[in-house]
Image: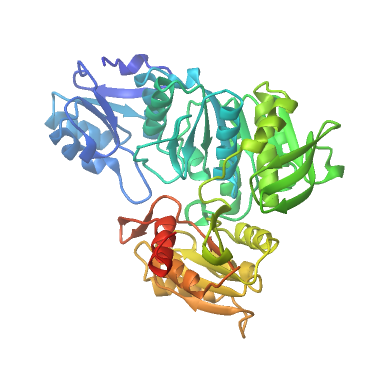
Amino acid sequence: MKLQFAQIPGVSILKSFGPEPTEVGSLVYNSAAARDGSAFFCVVGENTDGHLYIKQAIGNGAQAIIGSNEEILSKQAEQYPGVHFLLVADVRNALAHIADFFHGSPQHELFKVGVTGTNGKTTTATYVRNLFNLLGTPCGFIGTTGVETAEGKVPFEKSTPTTPIASDIHQIFALLRDAGTKAVAMEVSSTALDQQRVEGIVFDVAIHTNLSEEHLEYHKTFEHYRESKLKLFERAKAAVVNLDDPGLSEAILAMADYPVLTYSHNPASGADLIWGNYSASAQGMHFELNYKGDKKIVEAPLFGDYNAANLTAAVGTALHAGHSLDRIIAVLTEMPQVEGRFQVIRGPEGRTIILDYAHTPVAIDAVLTEARKLPHRRLIALIAGIGIRDFAKMPKMAKASEGKADVLVVTVDHPGFHDPEDVISEVIKGFSEPYQQKVLKAPTRKQAVEKALEESGPEDIILLSSGCINGCQIVNGEYIPHSDEEIIAAFFSSKTGKF
């Protein structure tokens, strides 16, 4: 399409060199993805600088270069007089606004729900997506488990595991719009907010789940992490806020000048939505929900008292969207499970395998506590250190899980460029001596899953926790395909001949 960059709302151009391209066919931030007619954005990242790849992008056909380094752009403009160069103050900001314009501003045709929090983003966003679909509003999803329309998953290679870069987001919005989707629930990470991936997007509802220490390998300080989360609520029309997490809720309520629904487990909190009297069975959860004095009984085929809180947040979102509480409660009995979030798989001889990719100390404590409530003979749990995350968190994973299972299998997720044994050793430092339970080690997640299953017997629960939810393991910069479910099926098929 013909793009007159200077006329695109939100884009502040400091200087331009060379002729504007007659047509722009694609927006890219990876020089290898450039082709004839591409506009290449020189994004500066943690480990690289897009300005260093201008020649490669032009060699692949890029006709427009957008960057923030005037010295480099002016030199390249002299060398490539037929290419259009734009100097902007902030490349990520420009990419967000240009991508929105390029794809025809599809965000304006979608009811957008953004979810942020240390734990519960995937679950809560998926609950919103599933609830809206049950209520008759076709809703998509963008997050850790992939990209979905109302009909199901669609193939899309996201630029990041959780919240994609801005150009991908608006391309996905266009894909959802063209598929007849009317709403989208998306995870919005602190990193994405800091890197302006959702710049220019105004969310119809922003959800806050909780806040605890995470991503300090990126943010460096907890305060920066917290401030990054708050940015979501600066770009919202309404919010759903968890009063049980005072660390962020107080700041959100102080700044919000739009409708807010609060939720809590504490009857004395004064929250709009109060959930309580939770109980669980083999069929799922049962709890009371009080909405401004109107008490309802909620039944859903889901597990985990913390998921009662996440489900309550989804209920609040549906209320903001204009649905009645009675209609919402009626469809909750049909809610499907969330992939990798207390996802229950029935194994042979009464085994229960639970996939819950809890990867923070707070989350692993919660899921182990919940798993112990279910009938079982023994509990075998897999925990992991994540090689691409903050090493200081690893011993805390062991400390949070200590004494809560009969057997703990310690392994590594996404070792990155680290020796897996180094990661495992960091986790094990968190255990007291002597160990309060049997501790096994495995250098790969595949071996750890198999070891946990091998250790199990009839009527046991096998909990597979941690961060491998995006279909791969990141090893030395490579993305190696991985599926816990496939490993489970192969393991029991080899033992019993069927699964």
Q: Residue at 65% x, 50% y: name it.
A: 303
User: Who's the residue at 70% across and 44% down the image?
Assistant: 309
* Residue 310 occupies quadrant: top right
How many numbered circles are shown?
0
* Location of residue 283 with respect to 451 vertically, above or below: above
Query: Is 374 displayed left or right of 90 in the figure?
Result: right
Residue for point 52% across, 67% down: 382
Instruction: Please provide percent x and percent y for residue 66.
Output: 29, 30
Asked whether residue 135 is in view, the answer is yes
Q: How is the image coloured?
A: rainbow
* Foreground pick, 330 / 393: 330
Q: Can residue 392 be seen here?
A: no
Q: Depth check: 496 or 120 in front?
A: 496
In the rendered image, which quarter contains the C terminus?
Answer: bottom left
Q: Where residue 51 appears, x then y in whole percent?
A: 26, 40
Q: In the displayed structure, would residue 1 be above or below residue 165?
A: above
Image coordinates for residue 392, horizontal then vertical, percent:
53, 66
Task: Please identify the residue farthest to the front as the structure is shown.
Answer: 497
* Residue 92 position within the rendered picture, expressed as x and y whole percent measured from the top left: 39, 34
Which image quadrant: the N terminus? top left
- Residue under the point 69% across and 29% down: 328
Residue that protrudes farthest toward the bottom in the picture: 434
Quadrant in the picture for residue 27? top left
- In the displayed structure image, the side of residue 24 where residue 392 appears, left or right: right
